[in-house]
Amino acid sequence: MSDVVSRDEFTVALTQGYPVPHLKTQADVDAFCERIITFFTETPNDYWIGHEPAGDTMQETPFGAVLTVDFGSIPTLRVHVLPGVVKFTLTEATLEKVDNQQAVGQAAIGVILFCSLETGKLEMTAILDDEEENPVMREQLLDDELEARNERRRALKEDANPKPPRAGEKSYVLGGNKKFDIDWL
């Protein structure tokens, strides 16, 4: 995970928030919330995310939205989606249950990954199953890779074994010093 999010970036995101500059209006915030809910729903995991029920929020937000990430059925992390930033707070259940820290960290990583995708820091690519792969495309990729490998081998071989000055002559040494031209065969 450190290849995607460093420890420092993770700490800054948890303490100061993750910048998402394109969140400018309430419509932007609402669309962002719908996309993150879809992201968590479509990704195989044990987390659920949804809008915080009215009146249960730790801070009132006149502009923005509050989402709650549940692990199993335990509210684990609150995600405050505000103009330009996504901030995190712990839920009461998490504050009471200290052994839930791993679930909090994983929930936060999921939100940070989504924010990274939204801001363009990361790019999602589709990984096809073997049944879904196009066999013609796979064959072409393999052929291209094989040709590139053979080209590298030829270059290495020429560097290691340069052609002798008389490489154009078609004669072979057959025992002793006798050379026979095999063009007549």
Image (cartoon, rainbow, N blue to C red):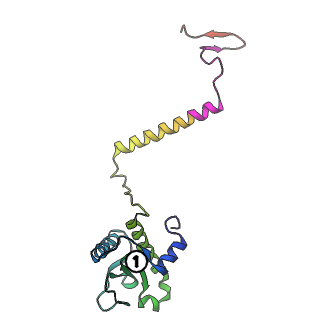
Residue 70 seen in the figure? no
Q: Is residue 135 magenta?
A: no
In the displayed structure image, the side of residue 12 where residue 72 appears, left or right: left
Q: Quadrant of residue 34?
A: bottom left
Q: Which residue is mark 1?
A: 86
In percent of the image, x 33 and y 52: which residue is there? Answer: 132
Q: What is the number of callouts on the image?
A: 1
List the single residue furthest toward the right. 176
Q: Is residue 162 above or below residue 30?
A: above
Is 16 on the left or on the right of 33, as rendered? Answer: right
In terms of image quadrants, where is residue 178? Answer: top right
The residue depicted at 49 percent of the width and 65 percent of the height is 4
Direction left: furthest residue? 27
Q: Residue 51, position in %: x, y?
A: 30, 82
- In the rendered structure, which segment of residues is drawn in magenta? 154-173
- Is residue 52 found left or right of 86 in the rendered image? left
Residue 161 to residue 137: above or below: above
Q: Left or right of 20: which side holds 154?
A: right
Q: Quadrant of residue 180?
A: top right
* Residue furthest out toward the front: 24
The residue at 52%/64% (across/down) is: 3
Callout 1 amino acid: Val
- Decide: is 179 above or below 111: above
Q: Position of residue 145 (x, y in %)?
A: 47, 41
Badge 1: how crowded within 10 Å, few (<14), some, or many (20+)? many
Helix, strand, or loop for circle 1? strand
User: Which of 63/143 is in front?
Assistant: 63
Is residue 157 part of the magenta span, yes or no? yes
**Image coordinates for residue 43, horizontal then vertical, percent:** 36, 68
Residue shown at 31% from the left, 83% from the top: 63
